[in-house]
Amino acid sequence: MPRPLVALIDDDPDVRHLLAMTLKRLYRVETAPDGPAGLELVRAQRPNVVVTDLGMPGLNGLDLCGTIKSDPELARIPVIIITGATRGEELPGGFWRLGTQADDFLQKPFPPEQLLAAVQAQLERAAGYKPLPPGTGSYGE
């Protein structure tokens, strides 16, 4: 069985390279330098997870996520948005969690293990993994 495919979309070549090296430890990785190329990649490759930067020219991460989630053929693909923005005014629409369709967000800088854990969590969620109910120690029926 092939390793899961992660589409990594970021306009900063250094960040894209660093994140790709981290992800390649566990996953196959295809990269794109901007939102429009990333959307083409997602449509052509149907990755298991998309990791995208928030602030990109042409098609930012929120718009890319919205486009993916509004396409019935792509909507089930989990999207993780990463951003270095720290203040609301730096973010499209003045927010980054409320009103979005992203499955997860990571605030830069983050340790490599946090990215790997976020991707793995989305893969498990997409595969139907359900966590144990809190405090039960077992799966409920």
Image (tube, rainbow, N blue to C red):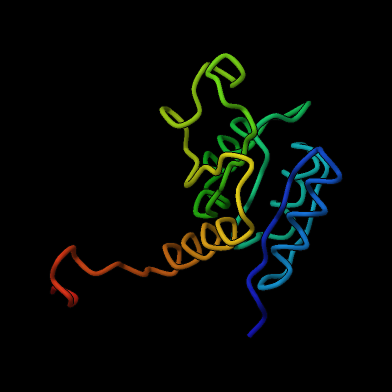
Q: Which quadrant would residue 59 be assigned to in this image?
A: top right
Which quadrant holds the N terminus?
bottom right
Please identify the quadrant where the C terminus is shown. Answer: bottom left
Q: Which of these two is toward me, 101 or 19? A: 19
* Residue at 73% across, 54% down: 19
Rendering quarter of residue 114: bottom right
Q: Name the spot of residue 96 as percent of width and height, x first.
A: 50, 28
- In this image, 52 relative to 35: left or right? left
- Residue sticking out furthest to the right: 13
Q: How many numbered discs? A: 0
Q: Position of residue 2 (x, y in %)?
A: 67, 81
Task: Judge whether 6 appears above or below 109 on screen.
Answer: below
Q: Which x, y percent locates residue 99?
A: 42, 27
Q: Residue at x 14, y 66 (%)?
A: 135
Image-based side of 63 in relation to 99, left or right: right
What residue is rendered at 70% in x and 55% in y? 7
- The residue that appears at 64% across and 36% down in the rendered structure is 64
User: Along the line of sight, which residue is nearer the eye, 72 or 51?
Assistant: 51
